[in-house]
Amino acid sequence: MPTAQQQSTISRLQPIHSEQQWKQMCWTEQGWKPAIIGFGASWLQPCVHVREVLETLASLAAEKGKTFLLFGFCDIDEGNSLTTAWGITNVPSIVFSRDGEIVNIVQGADPPTITRACREFMEDCHLSLNERLEKLVHRRPVMLFMKGTPDKPFCKFSRRMVEILNGEGIHFDYFNILADYQVRQGLKGYSNWPTYPQLYVKGELVGGLDIVEELHQSGKLKEQLHLS
């Protein structure tokens, strides 16, 4: 029987050696466990850092009683079948799965980015899609759902939306819809708006780029957003 001190040093990060093992660990009689799985190589220092971050987060989750959540790590040097099944080509990568499907992938070894993504996932992993969307559109007074990030927009429409908001001095938060398939598809139905970017103010849809551009050109954007 391990001592209390030994138990505190036992890694809560489970090694995942195959797709079949992941399925066995995640599937229960109640359905799929949500999972956070890191992918890396032991000989790459950034991957070592990511593994350490995930080990810390896994231990914190266990201490808070979040035993419903699986934290795992796949070493790509082992020819892992899960790496192939999920199409992981770049490491380090962290994959977030819900209901047996990938909902988000974070690449790179930036601890703040990884920590934020993991904490948000842990908070939301038991919410329905509509509950998640409701929470997201209310996350900040002004929320922009865009392709990419404000620093690196992935389309000209998202880039222009960011330019307008920054030019008007409007403080906003954003969500990269390319990083979460369920949100990307679900928000279209939630808002009854088929394209991106989408701008929300206090949980209410303002519209896409055409509407925001028109308000900007008329000088009425802040007034319409009740920010003047």
Image: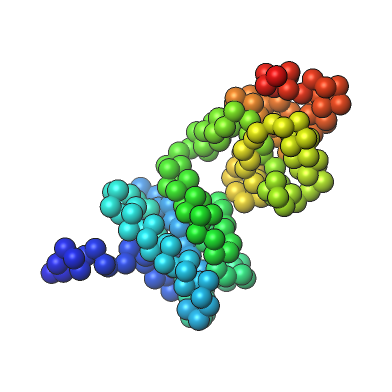
User: What is the x, y in percent for residue 160?
Assistant: 81, 40
Q: Position of residue 224 (x, y in %)?
A: 73, 19
Quadrant of the image occupied by residue 36: bottom left
Closer to the camera, 71 or 164?
Answer: 164
Viewport quadrant of the C terminus: top right
Percent x, y for residue 103? 55, 51
The residue furthest right is 217
Q: Is residue 133 left or right of residue 64?
A: right
User: Residue placed at 59% from the left, 62% from the top?
Assistant: 107
| Image height of 39 relative to 27, above or below | below
Q: Residue at x 43, y 52 (%)?
A: 34
Residue 132: where, in percent of width, then height? 52, 37
Instruction: Please state if 145 lies on the left or on the right of 102 as rendered.
Output: right
Protein image colouring: rainbow
| Res. 183 in view | yes
Q: How many marks?
A: 0
Residue at image position (82%, 27%) is: 216
Judge whether residue 161 can be spotted in this image. Answer: no
| Residue drawn where x is 38% and y is 53% of the image | 69
From the viewer's perspective, is residue 220 above or below residue 97? above
Above or below 175: residue 84: below
> Residue 56 is drawn in which quadrant?
bottom left
Rendered-image quadrant of the N terminus:
bottom left
